Image: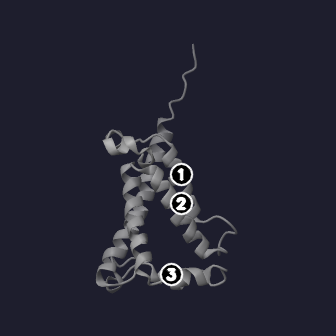
Amino acid sequence: MAKKQPTYKVAWYTLAISRIMVGFVFLWAFFDKLFGLQFATMPDKAWLAGGSPTTGFLKMGVNPDSSLAPFFNGLAGQAWVDWLFMVGLLGIGLALVLGIGLRIAAATGTTLLVLLWLAQFPLENNPLIDDHLVYAAVIITAAAARREWSIAGWWINLGFVKKNKWLW
């Protein structure tokens, strides 16, 4: 009797769940900063209330021992940084949850996460790895994997997506 080959369905579904979960991390950050849902952002600090979604982290979350602290502190309160951050959170989150545009989500998400990692380096609890790098690895893996539980089949058949494979 021939040995049955594994299908790896559980692995593909687990990766899809991981992709969606990381997507919700990005979307939650977006909505909390947009509306001030009282988790990381109070209502009076919400973006819609005139607050800056990046100032708190860039002023107080950056490791003061980092040689990059002056660079990150200097970005605080700049409108272009707030817009880029918020559009990034929304776009990366939607791409991961829907399973579309994962190539660009992997590039932009990894860039954002590495910048957040650099802002906190040297790390407090581990000499090298933290959740930012773990999330980046999940995003990169998801972009290279099968698109289980996604709308990718519909997405890649759109004319403008067919012509621009970087949108896959």
The N terminus - image quarter: top right
Which residue is labeled 3 in the image?
Answer: 75
Q: For this rendering, which residue is in front, 32 or 104?
A: 104
- Residue depicted at 46% across the width and 83% down the height: 56
- Type of amino acid under label 1: Ile
Task: Classify mark 2: helix, strand or loop.
Answer: helix
Residue 123 place in picture, x, y as percent: 65, 73
Residue 110, numbered label: 2
Task: Classify mark 1: helix, strand or loop.
Answer: helix
Is residue 40 among what the camera can see? Answer: no
Q: Mark 1 or 3, which is nearer the eye?
A: 3
Residue 140, numbered label: 1
Q: CA distance from mark 1 to mark 3?
A: 27 Å
Q: CA distance from mark 2 to mark 3?
A: 19 Å
Which badge, 2 or 3, is on the more N-terminal residue?
A: 3
Q: Are marks 1 and 3 in contact (CB under 8 Å)?
A: no
Q: Is residue 122 above or below residue 155?
A: below
